[in-house]
């Protein structure tokens, strides 16, 4: 169901989700865990045939120019029990990679909002990870030119509750906040957009690393490193891998 229609009808993600199948007109009824396992296998981040090495997405994000975050602070953070959470790219990739810290996002997905900047960065990360693009002469339902499995990934995340914040009347104040956040060295466009939207709505911002002091315009926002929502990751967590 299209996201605006589901929102208008008050329909939220539950223990069973409906996804588009592999064939045109096919629908798949799945549990939440099975849907995640299916998209992870399709992306190659976990599992796969014997002998096939998983291809995590977080190192590909670093390859795009993100600063490697280093170890988490190690403290535990409690989010509010309800209300939206604006999420950056890195936590979603950790979820898709199946890292221990990323698993903490699964029950939060019905509350997660992302910005267009994050959506674009997810797209580019699939390209950086080496996923091939569909052929230009592919059937219309395949959506030619996109990274293979991109639409499967986005459809699954949407079915599990994730929402994209398409700005209308909020465009000016959010962009004003983004401009103010340019004063913070080292923030990516996606991180700035995440912090600006969270500040505007007065809700937490879920990032992939600690950040420094924010300007006065955004000083009241609650910034959470997603790795502080779960036990410390294992030593082989790809987020801690140092890119070659």
Image (spheres, grey):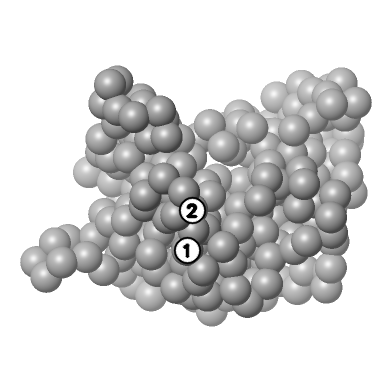
* Whether residue 243 is situated above or below residue 124 in the rendered picture: below
Q: Residue furthest left?
A: 51
Task: Report the label total.
Answer: 2
Is residue 40 toward the left or the right of residue 121 in the image? left
Q: Quadrant of residue 111?
A: bottom right
**Image point (64%, 32%), residue name:** 116
Q: Which of the two residues, 76 or 199, is positioned nearer the viewer here?
A: 199
Task: Point out which mark residue 3 bears.
Answer: none
Residue 118 location, x and y as percent?
A: 58, 38
Q: Is residue 69 visible?
A: no
Residue for badge 1: 28
How crowded pointer 1 is (Cα within 10 Å; few <14, some 14-19, many 20+) is rated as few
Judged from the image, the secondary structure of the residue bearing numbered disc 1 is strand
Q: Would you say the residues marked 1 and 2 are in contact, meaning their CB atoms lie under 8 Å apart?
A: yes
Q: Which of the two residues, 8 or 232, is positioned nearer the viewer here?
A: 8
**Image point (42%, 34%), residue name:** 141
Judged from the image, the secondary structure of the residue bearing numbered disc 2 is strand
Q: CA distance from mark 1 to mark 2?
A: 6 Å
Residue for badge 2: 20
Residue 84 location, x and y as percent?
A: 80, 56
Residue 135 location, x and y as percent?
A: 26, 26
* Whether residue 217 is situated above or below residue 17 in the rendered picture: above
Q: Is residue 201 visible?
A: yes
**Image point (70%, 55%), residue name:** 112
Residue 7 location, x and y as percent?
A: 80, 51
Q: Quadrant of residue 216?
A: top right
């Amino acid at each position: 169901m299209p996201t605006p229609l589901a929102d208008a009808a008050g329909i939220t993600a539950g223990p069973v989700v409906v996804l588009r199948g592999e064939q045109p007109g096919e629908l798949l009824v799945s549990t939440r865990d099975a849907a995640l396992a299916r998209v992870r296998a399709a992306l190659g981040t976990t599992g796969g045939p014997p002998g096939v090495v998983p291809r995590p997405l977080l190192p590909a994000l670093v390859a795009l120019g993100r600063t490697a975050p280093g170890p988490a602070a190690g403290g535990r953070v409690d989010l509010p029990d309800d209300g939206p959470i604006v999420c950056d790219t890195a936590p979603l990739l950790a979820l898709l990679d199946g890292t221990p810290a990323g698993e903490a996002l699964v029950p939060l997905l019905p509350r997660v909002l992302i910005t267009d900047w994050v959506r674009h960065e997810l797209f580019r990360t699939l390209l950086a990870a080496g996923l091939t693009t569909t052929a230009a002469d592919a059937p219309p339902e395949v959506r030619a030119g996109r990274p293979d499995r991109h639409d499967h990934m986005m459809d699954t995340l949407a079915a599990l509750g994730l929402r994209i914040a398409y700005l209308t009347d909020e465009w000016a104040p959010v962009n004003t906040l983004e401009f103010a956040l340019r004063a913070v060295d080292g923030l990516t466009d996606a991180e700035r957009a995440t912090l600006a939207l969270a500040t505007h709505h007065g809700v937490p911002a879920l990032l992939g690393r600690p950040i420094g002091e924010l300007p006065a315009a955004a000083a009241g926002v609650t910034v959470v490193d997603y790795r502080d929502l779960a036990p410390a990751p294992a030593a082989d967590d790809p987020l801690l891998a140092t890119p070659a």
